[in-house]
Amino acid sequence: MTETSAAFWRGARHSLPFTIVVIPFAILFGVVATEAGLNVLETMVFTVTVFAGASQFAALQLMQDNAPTLIVLATALAVNLRMVMYSVALAPHLGRAPLGWRAVMAYFLVDQSFAVSSIEYERRPDMPIMAKVAFFFGALLPVAPVWYAASLIGALAGRAIPPEFALDFALPITFLAMVAPLLRSLPHIVAAGVSILMSLLLAGLPWGTGVLVAAACAMAAGAALDWRMEQGRSK
Amino acid sequence: MIDKAQLWTVMPLMAVGTYLIRFSFLGMLGNRPLPAWLTRALRYTAVAVLPALVAPGVLWPAATGGQTDPARLAAAVMTLLVGVITRSVLGAIIGGAVTLYACLALVG
């Protein structure tokens, strides 16, 4: 096996555990989108072109609440802003790959491919550049095709699910489940707390704007506390 | 129901915006480091946006006409608890769903 194909399969092996998380999450997106009135084609266009689950859920929820288009876009893109960090972190490792490859990798830059690739590149900085590219695509193999397929299954099954299943609550549960493991430091906890408190206080604002203001306050609170704690450590 | 004109405006713009976010440094800006304050703020985006999106709906769900619902509240709390303890997204979803259905079955 060449070094490149070995790297591809190593990437696939490393991200294999994500498959089990992606399947229910993608099915849920298909179901929730269908419940919100999207047909199968619309659901699949959404999931294939955007390819960022949390922001897709956020956009669905805000559109259902009749939020203005600008607010929907601002909030959904705010959910994806963390990917700027991913892009920054991978640039030194992948910057020398041909532009065409980097353009395709950008589309596939998701939580899972970033997580396993950044660890691998730190561990093996001397990998040839095309082996690094191959590892990245290998890491997508257990994630991306499964994401598309499971979304489709959810979209096809969506209409068959009766209201007793309380699917209205699938979305809040999914978001809370994504946030909980992030609460690993005091600034993260404070940011989440401010986010909850402000969104409740501002719930009376025209729907959607309260979320943005609350998120901005929460981000500032987390970053400020993070900064103060770092200052404290360096003294 | 979602307005289709809005949907077909939001989807392409979201797709392009999300792609540009991902392409930014990997594609164009190369090895330029981000200012420290920006990295710091970006670290907290997910944890700042997602709770604000769900908190009002957890306390005042649309499905019950805005009345606080013990089953949904308990499910939300359980989801957070399981997620914090196990650090597993899937575990938290299962914990929340089981709680929701158990409470709904008890009440109904």
Image: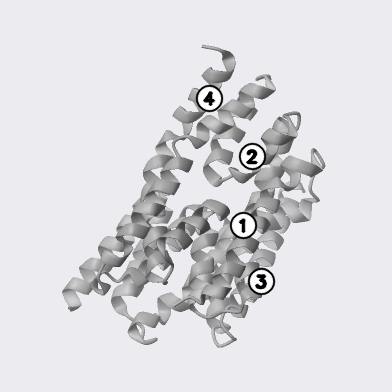
Q: Residue at x 45, y 59 (%)?
A: A41
The residue under label 3 is A217
Q: Nearer the viewer, mark 3 or mark 1?
A: 1
Q: Nearer the viewer, residue B32 or B19?
A: B19
The residue under label 1 is B15
Where disc 2 sits, the SS reads helix
User: Residue B3 at what x, y percent from top left?
Assistant: 51, 77
Q: Residue at x 36, y 62 (%)?
A: A31
What amino acid is found at the position of numbered circle 4 in the picture?
Answer: Phe
The N terminus of chain B: image quadrant: bottom left
Q: Residue at x 40, y 47 (%)?
A: A149
Where disc 1 sits, the SS reads helix
Please tell me whether residue B50 is drawn above or below residue A140 in the rendered image.
Answer: below
Label 1–label 4 contact, CB within 8 A: no
**Mark drawn on residue A104:** 2
Q: Nearer the viewer, mark 1 or mark 4?
A: 1
Please tell me whether residue A73 is drawn above or below residue A83 in the rendered image.
Answer: below
Which badge, 3 or 4, is on the more N-terminal residue? Answer: 4
